[in-house]
């Protein structure tokens, strides 16, 4: 009963995480009712998304592309008030955001993008370990906090990293339990996540 064009938009919205068909229909009807303004701004931002925002060349988080020739660094990598000695390794940008919300640390990050997963065919060679070593070669990092999730894959990844980096002069620690096993850092409450970071254990 919806015009085909609206159906297409409903279908696109419903591909977003957490958005079902009903919510997608609400979005579309809301945008339609807004008239000019919001739909155009949304379209403009969406068009720019994949060209104006790229992975940070230093940490793998998200960064806005600046003038040609300037390095693509995220706001955290550019922030001089951060502790330059602490690097927190996370699986995904969402985990970085969750740790930032907890306020437990003010260091910098390294985003792996994926976890070691034999079941899904992700091996050590698929992880950006070379990029992490290059980041550590910058020289200022003295403490590495591995904040991969407390799942089987997250633990395997933490173990792999601790072995790969064991010969380096680094204090390596692992986020403490407290975040439920198999749980997602993104959905841990700020206090639990903050405690898990404060209670980090050397590995
Ligand atoms: Zn960065």
Image (spheres, rainbow, N blue to C red):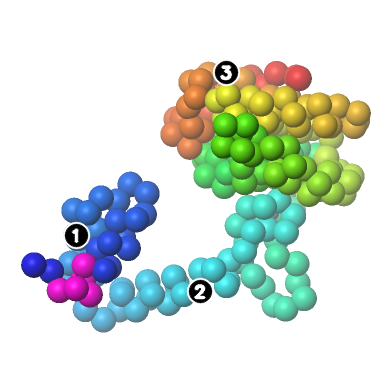
Query: Percent x, y for residue 86?
Result: 76, 37
Q: Residue beneath label 3, please?
A: 177
- Reading the chain from its start, which is encountered first: label 3 or label 1? 1
Few, some or many C-alpha atoms within 10 Å of disc 1 (few <14, some 14-19, many ≥20)?
few
Location of residue 84 (image quadrant): top right
Give me the residue at 62% from left, 64% from top. 54
Residue at image mark 2:
48
Label 1 SS? helix
**View quadrant of ligand 1:** bottom right
Is 25 one of the magenta-colored residues?
no
- The residue at 51%/68% (across/down) is 49
Secondary structure mostly taken by the magenta-highlighted segment of the chain: helix
Q: Secondary structure at mark 2?
A: helix
- Magenta part of the protein: which range? 3-7
Queried on whether the Cβ of the residue with tag 2 lies below 8 angstroms from ligand 1, the answer reads no
Residue 80 drawn above or below residue 52: above
Asked which quadrant contains residue 41, the reply is bottom left
Query: Residue at (61%, 38%) from the top-left corner?
Result: 121
In the rendered image, the vertical position of residue 166 relative to residue 137, given as above or below: above
In the drawing, does residue 84 fall left or right of residue 151? right
Residue bearing mark 1: 26
Q: Residues under labels 3 and 1: Cα distance?
A: 40 Å
- The quarter of the image holding the N terminus is bottom left
Crowding near the residue tagged with mark 2, few <14, some 14–19, many ≥20 C-alpha atoms within 10 Å: few
Quarter placement of the C terminus:
top right
Gap in Å between the C-alphas at discs 2 and 3?
40 Å
Instruction: Indicate which disc, 2 or 3, sits on the residue closer to the N terminus.
Output: 2
Q: Is residue 52 left or right of residue 17?
A: right
């Amino acid at each position: 009963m919806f015009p085909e064009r609206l159906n297409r938009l409903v279908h696109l919205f419903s591909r977003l995480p957490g958005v079902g068909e009903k919510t997608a229909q609400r979005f579309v009807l809301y945008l339609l009712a807004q008239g000019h303004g919001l739909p155009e701004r949304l379209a403009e931002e969406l068009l720019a998304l994949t060209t104006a925002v790229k992975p940070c060349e230093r940490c793998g988080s998200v960064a806005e592309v600046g003038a040609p020739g300037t390095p693509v660094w995220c706001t955290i990598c550019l922030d001089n008030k951060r502790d330059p000695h602490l690097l927190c390794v996370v699986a995904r940008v969402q985990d970085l955001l969750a740790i930032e919300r907890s306020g437990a640390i003010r260091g910098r990050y390294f985003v792996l993008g994926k976890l070691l997963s034999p079941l899904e065919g992700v091996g050590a060679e698929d992880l950006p370990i070379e990029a992490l070593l290059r980041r550590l070669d910058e020289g200022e990092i003295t403490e590495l906090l591995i904040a991969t999730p407390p799942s089987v894959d997250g633990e395997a990844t933490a173990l792999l990293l601790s072995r790969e980096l064991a010969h380096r002069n680094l204090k390596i620690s692992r986020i403490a339990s407290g975040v439920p096993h198999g749980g997602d850092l993104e959905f841990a409450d700020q206090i639990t996540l903050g405690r898990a970071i404060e209670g980090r254990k050397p590995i």
